[in-house]
Amino acid sequence: MNQQAVIEKLKTIYDPEIPVNIYDLGLIYDIRVIGSAVYIVMTLTTAACPAAAFMPEEVRATVAGAPGITAVHVDIVYEPRWTNALMSAAARASLGFS
């Protein structure tokens, strides 16, 4: 699996409070594919986000379901802090940010 295939998997996961997938929302900071293992560094919109209880596991399970993946490591970080500037142009437009 390559990085683009991982991105496509991540685009199927939506923030429960915002109708935008987590990749276009800008929550994914880094993706590394090393052999059959995937390493993802991500954040949440805030440190108090209710999704913190389940989002890392959802990301892990979704990516782990891809053919050829034997391990997925998800690290949640809060620095740098997420802002709406990290969103894709399409996501900003769909949510009314200019």
Image (tube, grey):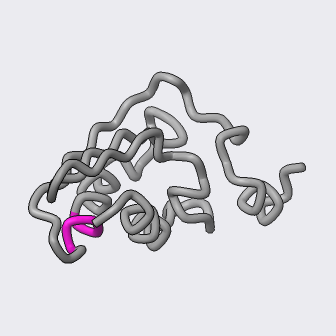
Residue beneath the point at 62% across and 68% down: 19
Instruction: Please state if 70 lies on the left or on the right of 80 as rendered.
Output: left
- For residue 20, above or below residue 23: below
Q: Position of residue 63 (x, y in %)?
A: 27, 65
Residue 93 colored in magenta in the image: no
Residue beneath the point at 52% across and 56% down: 23
Near-viewer residue (89 or 78): 89
Q: Position of residue 56 (x, y in %)?
A: 29, 51
Instruction: Please state if 98 lies on the left or on the right of 48 as rendered.
Output: right
Q: Quadrant of residue 90?
A: bottom right
Near-viewer residue (97 or 4): 4
Extreme residue in the right direction: 98
Instruction: Please state if 23 lies on the left or on the right of 89 as rendered.
Output: left
Extreme residue in the left direction: 70
Magenta residue span: 61-65
Q: Position of residue 79 (x, y in %)?
A: 47, 22
Location of the N terminus by quadrant is bottom left
Overall secondary structure of the magenta section = helix
- For residue 80, above or below residue 48: above
Residue beneath the point at 54% across and 41% down: 45
